[in-house]
Image (cartoon, rainbow, N blue to C red):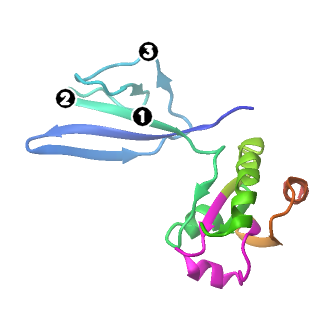
Amino acid sequence: MSVKISCQVSTVFGVRGGVVHSHSPFLSKERLHLPTTICSKGPNISFSLSSIRRCQGSRIICKAREAVDEVQVVTDSSWNNMVIGSENPALVEFWAPWCGPCRMIAPVVDELAKEYAGKIQCFKLNTDDCPSIATQYGIRSIPTVLFFKNGERKESIIGAVPKSTLTATIEKYLEM
């Protein structure tokens, strides 16, 4: 299984009295040149991109994280960007910390996130913390797992179901 890495690139310029950060996303045409080019002292990992000139007193920092093979927490404020705007099909588990069946299905969803890394996005939403999204989608029992594709709700599964039930549903929407 391959793990995709997402990076946040920051160009950091030293300024009297503080530091100013300028964030820019990777463009697909930019290349990393390794080994690293260090523009300033410090423990940060620094490197240069082909489209950015080295500047004295500045450095480019990459903060990498595994973003694909884990279940991400979604909230009211991140719902549209993370779930509705997802390029891949999305699986969303609605749960609460006090719910016993939710604790039973959580490891299954974690396994599916790893198995289908790069093919689907897996999210979890705490219904106690974000009741408006649960109400919007008519969630009356937890755990409930909703499947989204192209920003549209496709299917819901209620209760602590076996992994095979969730896998069959995922496969159905990957084939479409």
Quadrant of the image for the N terminus? top right
Q: Secondary structure at mark 3?
A: loop
The answer for how far apart the CA atoms under marks 1 and 2 are is 17 Å
Q: Is residue 142 magenta?
A: yes
Amino acid beneath label 2: Gly
Q: Earlier in the sequence, mark 2 or mark 3?
A: 3
Disc 2 to disc 3, C-alpha distance:
19 Å
Residue visible at 65% across and 68% down in the picture: 95
- x, y percentage for residue 165? 90, 59
Quarter of the image with the C terminus is bottom right
Q: Which three-letter amino acid code belongs to the residue tagged 1?
A: Cys
Closest to the observer, 102 or 18:
102
- Residue at numbered disc 2: 57
Q: Amino acid at mark 3?
A: Pro
Residue 2 or residue 28, whichever sits in front:
2
Q: Find numbered disc 1 in the image and state the secondary structure of the residue it sits on.
A: strand
Horizontal side of 157 relative to 143 (left or right) equals right
Q: Which residue is mark 3?
A: 35
- 10 Å neighbourhood of mark 1: few (<14), some, or many (≥20)? some
Mark 2, Cα crowd under 10 Å, few <14 / some 14-19 / many 20+, is few
Above or below, 151 relative to 120: below
Q: In this view of the protein, which residue sits in the foreground, 14 or 31? A: 14
For mark 3, does the 10 Å Cα neighbourhood hold few (<14), some (14 to 19), or many (20 or more) residues? few
The residue tagged 1 is 62
- Name the residue nearer the viewer: 29 or 46: 46
Label located before the other in sequence (3 or 1): 3
| Quadrant position of residue 143 | bottom right
The residues colored magenta run 123-147
Quick one: label 1 or label 2, which is nearer the N terminus? 2
